[in-house]
Image (cartoon, rainbow, N blue to C red):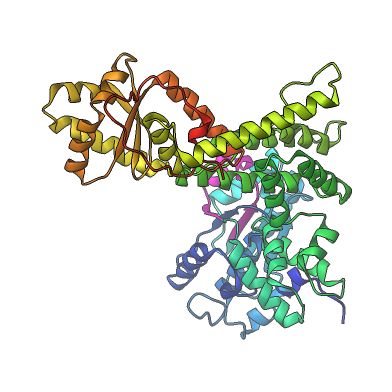
Amino acid sequence: MKYKVLYRKYRPDNFDDIVGQEYIIKTLKNSIINGNISHAYIFSGPRGTGKTTTAKVFSKAINCLNPHDGSPCGECEFCKNFHDNPDIIEIDAASNNGVDEIRELIENVKLTPTNGKYKVYIIDEVHMLSTSAFNALLLTLEEPPAHSIFILATTNIENVPITILSRCQRYDFQKIKIDDIINRLKYICELEKIDADDEALNEIAYLSEGGMRDALSLLDQLSKSNQKITLELIEKQIKTISQKNIDELLTSIEDNDVEKCLNLINEYRIRAVDYKTLIKKIIEVASQKAKNIKISGIIKRLDFNDYKNLILKLADSLNKININVDSYTILEMIILDFFESSCNLINEYPVKEETIQNEVKNDEIEKEEKTEAIENNNNDDLVNIRINNCFVDAQKKYLEEAKEEIANFISIEVEGKVKSILIDSTVVAASSKNLILVCNNIHNVETANKMVKEIEDGLNKEFNKMYKIIFISNERWLQEKEKYIQNLKTKTVYKYIEEKEVSEEETIVNSVFDKNKIEII
């Protein structure tokens, strides 16, 4: 028996086997049940989503002698001879787009059906018709014979004249969900005795971009290897790249590991990974990471704007792949822009080995002194400790909650000075236990911190909290925020520091932020 490719072998011949277009199928079945058959339909949507298949099944159903719930019975004479029925005329407008072909079709429209109730004309890629051909078709659509039905299919609805669209019932086909494609692939693999793991089927579904025909074509191609279909086999044969590889690439950027990143890109180049597929996958994963940052407020080395800029630059690079430059070179230059330089200054003059050793020794002594200061907590002042402790667990949800609480507290607070300070201040960072507020007027910082205990007591009593508050200037906050972002990018971890008793004589204002007050793990 002559071999038939999978997408043809398993093309649905009834409504129940059409995947991913439930609403359209239900509507068409109801129109058959109720006898409300239109004279013209237009099916639009991406390739491989079932437009032509649905048109054929619909043609079969409306001519079926014994339809069941709007579906063809599959047993009557018309259903059995459907593929050889002269009353179902399929035309490819891509190769028959002239006015002469349409005029010939119009002449045949006048003829009554040979076997069924209707003569059905399925015109695929109808947007390819010439202007004169559209005009000729329009005359028939305005006054069609009662026995004729037109089903137009297109992947480019924008190029179909509005005069044609207005005379058709329009159905927009959507890309098929990945899970639906995977389930269909599993079903066919079972029937065809094809050995494929779940990870591979998921990749095939992803590469199909919502088209069942493309998914089955890929499965058919891979099955010819006569070995188990795995992710490794797909990467080798289709020149694609897995989700794991993309995660690895973005992780190297987050870790500021330039060497690993460049090695990965070079590996993709050697494997001849399709550039468009690679960029689309990076964009997809990067956009998910950007969304997660907005949702959770948790930032690693790259923040939301970093990912947004990366996505925009990568998308723009897709327009440059036809120029006479290696696409991977463009990718390298784009991605390298998101790394931090390994050094800020290159010494133009040679340095003696003795000098280098002394510098290293001094650095080690300084590091030991800092570590000892951290552990002993001898010289910590309240400003530094509370800034550090707030950053330990700073989250957006705590910030929004604190802003609302302070706004409510201002509305009920009767003490004039406290109210004045809080009105002048803005909560800029918050954890479950600590708040950092910026005084818009720098001269209010000292006064605010002198009254911080009174403000804490009132706020905590009103909202049943245990907040520790500190006030700083806007200039100081900009410095601390920049340090906080840099520490996140370099994976510096803040550790909570217990507050010591601070007497009223000890000042807690105008202190200089000391890195010793940040615990680094």
The image quadrant of residue 72 is bottom right
Q: Is residue 396 left or right of residue 307?
A: left
Q: So how many labels did they put on this image?
A: 0
User: Toward the viewer: 176 or 398?
Assistant: 398
Rendered image quadrant of residue 314: top right
- Please give the name of the residue rendered at 57% of the width and 42% of the height, measured from the top-left corner: 300
Residue drawn 54% across the image and 38% down it: 372
**x, y (%) of residue 25?**
52, 66
Q: Residue furthest bottom?
A: 75
- For residue 337: magenta? no
Above or below 58: residue 468: above
Q: Quadrant of residue 349?
A: top right
User: Residue 380 at x, y = what percent?
Assistant: 42, 32
Q: Which residue is rendered at x = 67% and y = 35% of the image?
A: 364
Q: Is residue 118 visible?
A: no
Residue 454, given in percent of the width and then of the height, sits at: 20, 31
Question: Which residue is found at the position 83% from the left and 16% from the top?
Answer: 348
* 63 or 483: nearer the viewer: 483
| Nearer the observer, 180 or 169 | 180
Image check: 318 left or right of 500? right
Q: From the viewer's perspective, is residue 274 above or below residue 425? A: below
Seen in the picture, residue 489 relative to 114 is either above or below; the reply is above
Q: Position of residue 294 (x, y in %)?
A: 48, 42
Q: Which residues are magenta?
A: 149-172
Residue nearer the viewer, 482 or 43? 482
Magenta stretch encompasses residue 165: yes
